[in-house]
Image: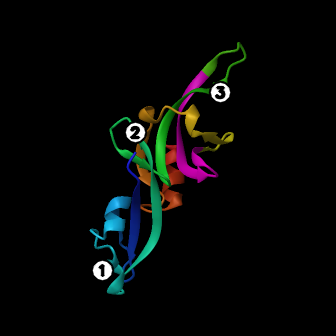
Amino acid sequence: MEIKFRYTYRRKEDGHVWQVIYSMQSIENGTEQFGSMLNNNLWEIIARDLYTGQKDKDGNEIYGEDKVKWHDKHAEATPKGGFIAKDKFSKIVWRGCGFWVEDEDFGYEGENLWRWEEMEVIGNTHEQSWTDYEKEKTN
């Protein structure tokens, strides 16, 4: 797996957010010019998110702090021992030694329990406010 980071910059003047993906190799070799954005004092780094090594159902790379939509086939138990499925919205987080899916119903689930290819990246916590994310969950 190639080690990559998603850098998130914010323009100081108006709060505009810009994201760029850099590989570890390009950073170490000095082939990326991300320092020039900071040298002009117009931008600031607000986040560095690590690539999980996984892709969603549409082939998009999944990074820490991404917001994902997924279908929980066992969301609610029925009185007869069955389950009711529902769509859920969660955030990808780093916990200790790996990436986890933050779930509102039971805390966190480890990466080995998920089918990453069934998730859909719908954004990340840097692109839109958490309030907007909460609104999406209720729709």
Asked if labels 3 and 1 touch by Cβ distance under 8 angstroms, the answer is: no
Q: Earlier in the sequence, mark 3 or mark 2?
A: 2
At horizontal 62% and vertical 39% (from top left) the residue drawn is: 109
- Residue type at mark 1 is Ser
**Residue 76: mark:** 3
Camera-side residue of 44 and 85: 44
Disc 1: which residue: 36
Amino acid type assigned to the residue bearing label 3 in the image:
Glu
- Residue 39 spot, x, y in % from top left: 34, 85
* Residue 133 is at least partly visible in this image: yes
**Residue drawn 42% across the image and 33% down it:** 117
Q: Is residue 118 above or below residue 137?
A: above
Choose top left, top right, bottom left or bottom right for residue 105.
Answer: top right
Q: Along the horizontal axis of the image, is 38 left or right of 71?
A: left
Contact between labelled residues 1 and 2, with CB atoms less than 8 Å apart:
no
Q: Which residues are magenta?
A: 84-101
Q: Secondary structure at mark 1?
A: helix
- Mark 2 vs mark 1: in front: 1
Residues packed near mark 3 inside 10 Å, few (<14), some (14 to 19) or many (20 plus)? few
Q: Nearer the viewer, mark 3 or mark 2?
A: 2
The spot of residue 110 in percent (x, y) is 61, 39
| Residue under pointer 2 | 56
Label 1 to label 3: alpha-carbon separation: 51 Å
Say above or below: 135 vs 41.
above
Q: Is residue 32 magenta?
A: no
